[in-house]
Image: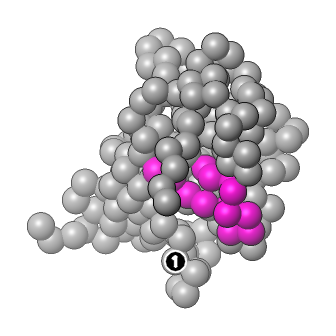
Amino acid sequence: MWEELPLPRNGWLSDVDFDFDNPDITYISYGSASNLGPNATGTEMVYKMDYTNPSIISSYDCTNHPCATVCATGCTDLTQNLPSTGVGNDAFALEKGSDGGMYIATDFGVYYTNNKYLANGTGWQKFGANLPNVECRGLEINYVMVVCQMKVSHSFFKLLNFFIFAFTMCI
């Protein structure tokens, strides 16, 4: 039986990922910050949701607590220092076997964080170099080839051993 789960805010979802170890933990990214405008950092872009007991989470509960790290029981805003920008479809990835490694592709580049960075306030770090500032059309970690792959407009990028290789796609 399907069950509708509460969301932290009203908006366009760009991606949903599930924790590798706990099926009740879900990561949700939105298509843009809730405060698009002159602010340098975004708000309410990435959340960690604990749906162990979904009835205790109120829909849109986090909208009353902008910039709060913990919005409500079961709802944690992980946005911290991400830029106020758009996020493409399928632009969020969890890194298996890491300390909560997460990647998100924004219009301003790809960013990385993990549990340590989130806990100590470092937040998100720019990941890779020489990536174009364009809308991402997909981000994934390829565990077979041990690379992070990203498709943007008419190009395809792979990060292999921390070196960027660009491949132009024929369309």
Colouring scheme, one of rainbow, by chain, secondary structure, one colour? one colour
Task: Please say whether residue 45 is visible from this viewpoint.
Answer: yes
Q: Residue at x 73, y 51 (%)?
A: 52
Residue, disc 1: 142
The image quadrant where one finds the C terminus is bottom left
Q: Is residue 107 above or below residue 16?
A: above
Q: Residue at x 80, y 62 (%)?
A: 99
Q: Is residue 57 above or below residue 43?
A: below
User: How many numbered discs sit on the rendered protein?
Assistant: 1
Specify the quadrant of the image occupied by residue 141.
bottom right
Q: Of the residues shown, which amino acid type is indicated by label 1?
A: Asn
Q: Position of residue 63 (x, y in %)?
A: 59, 18
Secondary structure of the residue carrying tag 1 is: strand
As drawn, the residue found furthest toward the bottom would be 144
As drawn, the residue found furthest toward the right would be 120
Q: Is residue 165 above or below residue 51?
A: below
Q: Nearer the viewer, residue 146 or 46?
A: 46
Magenta residues, start to end? 15-27
Specify the quadrant of the image occupied by residue 101.
bottom right
Q: Residue at x 63, y 23 (%)?
A: 61
Task: Please say whether residue 108 is visible from this viewpoint.
Answer: no
Indicate left or right for 28 with 48 as reference.
left
Q: Nearer the viewer, residue 48 or 38?
A: 48
> Badge 1: few (under 14), some or many (20 or more) residues near its Cα, within 10 Å?
few
Q: Position of residue 107 (x, y in %)?
A: 40, 40
**Magenta stretch containing residue 16, yes or no?**
yes
Indicate left or right for 107 with 118 as reference.
left
Indicate left or right for 10 with 171 as reference.
right
**Magenta stretch containing residue 89, yes or no?**
no
Q: Nearer the viewer, residue 114 or 133?
A: 114
